[in-house]
Amino acid sequence: MSQTTTGSELKSLFLLDPSITYLNYGSFGACPREIFEAYQGYQLELEREPVHFITRAGMEYAARSRKELAGYLHCDADDIVWTMNPSYAVNIIAKSFALSPGDEILATDLEYGACDKTWDYYCEKAGAKYRRQKINLPVQDAQQIVEDLFKGFGPRTRLVFVSHLTSSTGMILPVHDIVREAHRRGVPCFVDGAHAPGQIGLDITTLDADMYVGACHKWMLSPKGCSFLYVRRSLQDTIDPLIISWGYKAMFPGPSRFQDYHMVQGTRDYSAFLTVPHCLEFMRKYQWDRVRSHCRAMVRSNATRFFQLLESDPICPIDEEFIAQMLSIPIRCAEPELLYKKLFEKYNIEIPVMRQDDRVYLRYSINAFNQQEDLDRLYDALLEIKKEGQLLEL
């Protein structure tokens, strides 16, 4: 049964250190206590009978969990496999994707750094090029993003790779339009949706991306090490696993070679994967649509005063089309790492100060446990640092 819970009551459901003002949910999430206890329960079951768990019971749990996740994502369960994190999944695709010298992978210049490095690595090995196409900021509308991106499309473009929400900017990109345009031009589209599941609505079938990666340990509330990779069925046989193990030429084949290759890897603790049904039940129980709506309203209602304080301008419209539960503010800061350190060590505020090429962003992200006083505390800390004349020096 669902129930309405106040912000302070929701905060008590999490394991976060109460002495820290936690405004960085977007980096690694935070797992509620009851989900974490379910996770530990699976780990205990694993240790009580490791062979049975790894070879039978745990695999059955994982299949059921994958089915529930597929229902949440609106896709077929056999089209998704578990991965430890989104970077792992991006590596699976990048290593498998056939590239020839002169081929190009097209992406925005707003992608996550680890993914940029992955594509750089595999493109260099193949003699191909990873093209980070400039998106002009500030963004005026969704069509501008599509037009900016596809200015980098050429005759040797073999894949479009794009974030659903970008990590450094917190901005939602028009992935439906990007996928359609990639397909119109005859190339597949791979979407990095690390921040999407649990933060915004996601229907993978309707999106029609050829490949999609998402994290459950961010906005879906699971313990760390729980992510997934979706691959369109017609492409699955082209995607090799990073680890060749018992799933290769499986003695007892499962529902597909895709599942065998990527799921059967010998000894590993996949307890985090098994918690997804608990996460979905938690969100139903606490009316998570209402929680998300409240968080989004808090993110947007505080935006103007932070832009004014930091003498900055938004990089996109501050509305539901572009902003969900994360907001990034461009700041002028010579040493962002020192600003992060000062906010954490002096003010007990956990918030990222991130570099993206020649830009620096201060990004706050809001979830159920946050209250207005958290953002007030951040504001007061930044105001004090600014009055001390240290903001530009840090």
Image (cartoon, helix red, strand yellow):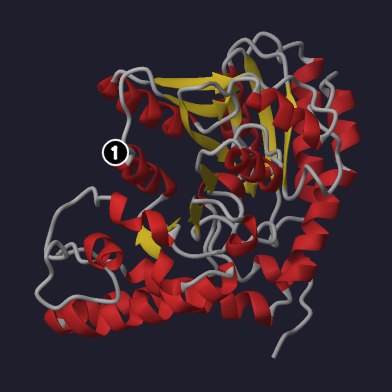
Toward the bottom, the furthest residue is 1
Left or right of 232 on screen, residue 375: right
- Residue 259 occupies quadrant: bottom left
Asked if one can make out residue 330 in the rendered structure from this viewpoint, the answer is yes
The crowd level at tag 1 (other Cα within 10 Å; few <14, some 14-19, many 20+) is some
Q: Could you tell me which secondary element the residue under label 1 belongs to?
A: helix
Q: Is residue 104 above or below residue 262?
A: above
Left or right of 105 on screen, residue 94: left
Q: Is residue 345 above or below residue 357?
A: below
- Residue 42 occupies quadrant: bottom left
Is 373 in front, or is 247?
Answer: 247
In the picture of the structure, the residue carrying the numbered disc 1 is 95
In percent of the image, x 57 and y 63: which residue is there?
Answer: 220
**Residue 70, percent from left and from top:** 51, 72
Is 372 in front, or is 180?
Answer: 180
How many numbered badges does the structure rendering display? 1
**Residue 154, percent from left and from top:** 54, 21
